[in-house]
Amino acid sequence: MLCSRCLTVLCSIGGAFGGNRGLRPVPPEKGIFPLDHLHLCDLEKVEYLNCLKTAGHQSEKCRQFSKKYLQCRMERNLMAKQDLAELGFKESTVETTGGKVTDRVVTQDQ
């Protein structure tokens, strides 16, 4: 059992639960965006979740729904606009006329 003085010293060193006092937390680069309080993208979310359920939670089978959901969030400023290729939405490799294999990015128009 710790004496009250030792407990006071331990608490003042790193906070009551060991946290660093005085240091400001830095948010992660990705993953933090406003919640959809107005339910602007509920339809897309439900479609994606239903697809996951029917596909046995194999997300690769529901990529078109996750893409649609992310596009909805970007259009309504619920997340930063970003190229879909940067989010992993690339079509399989395509061979060009010179025999060179490249990644083809899927756009909305395709």
Image: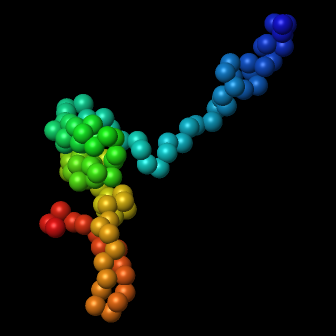
Answer with left or right where residue 28 lies relative to residue 22.
left
Residue located at (40% from left, 42% from top): 32
Residue located at (27% from left, 37% from top): 53
- Residue 30 versus residue 20: which sits nearer the camera? 30
Q: With respect to residue 97, does 65 lie above or below?
A: above
Residue with the most extreme bottom position: 98
Q: With respect to residue 89, does 98 lie above or below?
A: below
Q: Quadrant of residue 83?
A: bottom left
Q: Quadrant of residue 105?
A: bottom left
Q: Position of residue 87 (x, y in %)?
A: 36, 57
Q: Position of residue 89 (x, y in %)?
A: 32, 61
Answer with left or right where residue 80 lies relative to residue 75.
right
Residue located at (24% from left, 31% from top): 37
Q: Position of residue 73 (x, y in %)?
A: 25, 46
The colour scheme used to paint the residues is rainbow
Q: How many marks?
A: 0
Observer able to see residue 74: no
Answer with left or right where residue 74 lies relative to residue 8.
left
- Residue 41 versus residue 47: which sits nearer the camera? 47
Residue located at (31% from left, 82% from top): 95
Q: With respect to residue 36, does 76 lie above or below?
A: below
Q: Position of residue 31 (x, y in %)?
A: 42, 44
